[in-house]
């Protein structure tokens, strides 16, 4: 499932390609046909993200809510657009660009109150300017749940996935099994601001890189990471490999139905 930086990148791409212009809206697959017919020929007025949720604004109070889930994909291209291939749920088209959406968990036309209800059930997002660490801290500071599980709970903090979860805990030397209430507020504030910085870089470069300059392959004289997920990381999907910092073995374990990665020496209990 894409992490939050990807959804913010998609919102920016929609604004750049379609913002302020009338768009043709269709549903080649047919599952979004009624809504597409209502929106066809209207202007895309807004595109925003909150965590892993994308919102495309059209007429006042009308939003297309998209959640990619595990299998959703968005593809952009320049016109002329090819005939839709596969199960395209939603196509946007103007004189210069097209967008095809396939396989999302959610793609629905919603009202402003329905959109607000989604925001209300989500935690703060480090990439939203009007969010900060305080609201999440009030929940984390009272919780006996592990900080690793809390970081993946979208009701606590929105947009963080398995990669950012593993990497930010390593960067701050936090044992992933530490209870939320055993963090200090200063530790949580530092984690929040680090997440915001890392995720902004993710939006900018469209990949996740979490290693500091002194730990890059060039600085350390080591081979670059080779992985489908791309990006230089400390612990994510590096189980049984040596830690870049201490040389110890990276561990992995299951937690909340996801694989957890950490270095026991750099993140002591």
Image (spheres, rainbow, N blue to C red):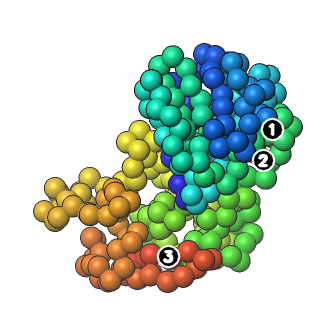
- Residue lying at 61% horizontally and 65% vertically, measured from the top left: 152
Residue 215 position, x and y percent, is: 25, 60
Q: State which quadrant residue 92 falls in.
A: top right
Q: Is residue 30 visible in this depiction of the protein?
A: yes
Image-based side of 228 in relation to 147, left or right: left
Point out the image quarter for the N terminus.
bottom right
In the picture shown, does residue 252 fall above or below 228?
below
Q: Secondary structure at mark 1?
A: strand
66 above or below 165?
above
**Quick one: label 1, few (<14), some, or many (20+) residues within 10 Å?**
some
| Image quadrant in which you'd find residue 100 | top right
Residue 131 relative to residue 3: left or right: right
Q: Position of residue 21 (x, y in %)?
A: 60, 16
The residue wearing badge 2 is 118
Find residue 147 and report its horizontal and vertical position in percent: 60, 71
* Helix, strand or loop for disc 3: strand
- Label 3 sits on residue: 260
Question: 29 or 154, which lies in front?
Answer: 29
Q: Which residue is mark 1?
A: 110
Distance between mark 2 and mark 3 Cα atoms:
28 Å
Vertical relation: 251 (above or below) 126: below
Q: Nearer the viewer, mark 2 or mark 1?
A: 1
Q: Position of residue 229 (x, y in %)?
A: 38, 59
Image position of 119 (left or right of 82): right
Identify the residue shown where x is 54% and y is 48%: 86
Is there any visible trace of residue 68 in the rendered image? Answer: no
Secondary structure of the residue carrying numbered label 2: helix
């Amino acid at each position: 499932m894409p992490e939050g930086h990807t959804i913010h990148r998609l919102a920016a791409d929609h604004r750049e390609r379609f913002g302020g212009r009338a768009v043709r809206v269709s549903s080649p697959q047919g599952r979004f046909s009624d809504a597409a017919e209502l929106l066809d020929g209207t202007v895309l007025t807004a595109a925003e993200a909150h965590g892993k949720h994308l919102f495309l604004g059209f007429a006042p109070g009308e939003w297309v809510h998209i959640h990619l889930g595990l299998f959703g994909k968005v593809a952009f291209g320049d016109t002329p657009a090819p005939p839709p291939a596969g199960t395209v749920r939603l196509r946007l088209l103007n004189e210069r660009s097209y967008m095809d959406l396939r396989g999302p968990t959610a793609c629905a036309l919603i009202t402003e109150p329905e959109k607000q209800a989604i925001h209300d059930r989500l935690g703060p997002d480090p990439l939203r300017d009007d969010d900060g660490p305080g609201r999440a801290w009030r929940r984390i500071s009272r919780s006996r749940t592990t900080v690793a599980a809390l970081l993946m709970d979208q009701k606590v903090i929105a947009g963080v996935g398995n990669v950012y979860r593993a990497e930010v805990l390593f960067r701050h030397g936090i044992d992933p099994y530490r209870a939320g209430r055993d963090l200090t507020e200063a530790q949580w504030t530092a984690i929040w601001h680090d997440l915001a910085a890392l995720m902004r870089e993710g939006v900018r470069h469209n990949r996740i890189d979490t290693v500091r300059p002194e730990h890059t392959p060039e600085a350390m004289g080591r081979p670059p990471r080779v992985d489908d997920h791309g990006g230089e990381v400390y612990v994510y999907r590096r189980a049984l490999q040596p830690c870049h910092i201490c040389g110890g073995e990276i561990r992995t374990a299951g937690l909340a139905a996801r694989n957890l990665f950490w270095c026991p020496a750099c993140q002591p209990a």
